[in-house]
Amino acid sequence: MTPRHVAALVLLVLGVAALLLASLAAVVLPGPYARLHALSAASTLGAPLCMLAVAVETGPGRAALKLVFIGVVLAVGGTVGTTALGRTTVLLNDPQHGEADS
């Protein structure tokens, strides 16, 4: 095994572990805010680590750059999505809160 392959395996194991732990936490934790907190780790850590592992395994080149870009988009998009879902949950549970912000 080459060092690049070992690095890709380590990144993949870390990414899959983060995704599995986030999934387990989403099932176990009570309440929408705790679940959102757990799922944000999957989108900001798990998926980008998996993309980075595939990029490392691919080697230098345009394909690896595309994979890194996809990982960055997943990390940023997941954060924005989690924030939007949290805000919607707050507005649905407490209509007075939404009126105070406007």
Image (cartoon, rainbow, N blue to C red):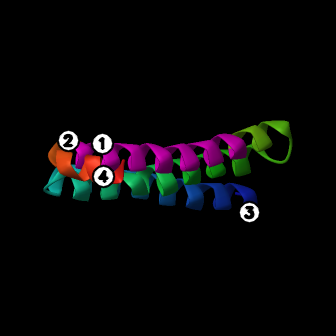
Sequence-wise first label, 2 or 4: 4
Tag 2: amino acid: Leu
Q: Which residue is mark 1?
A: 88
Q: Pick the residue in front: 59 or 25.
A: 25
At 50% from the left and 57% from the top, the residue drawn is: 45
Q: Is residue 15 visible?
A: yes
The stretch drawn in magenta includes residue 53 = no
Disc 2, disc 1: CB below 8 Å? yes
Q: CA distance from mark 2 to mark 4?
A: 15 Å
Q: Position of residue 84 (x, y in %)?
A: 40, 44
Which element is circle 1 on?
helix
Judge depth for marks 1 and 3 and give the one in front: 1
Sequence-wise first label, 1 or 3: 3
Sequence-wise first label, 3 or 4: 3
Disc 1, disc 3: CB below 8 Å? no
Q: Magenta segment, which residues?
A: 68-91
Q: Position of residue 36 (x, y in %)?
A: 30, 52
Residue furthest left in the image: 30
Of the numbered discs in the image, which one, if any, rests on residue 92?
A: 2
Q: Position of residue 13 (x, y in %)?
A: 49, 57
Judge depth for marks 3 and 4 and give the one in front: 4
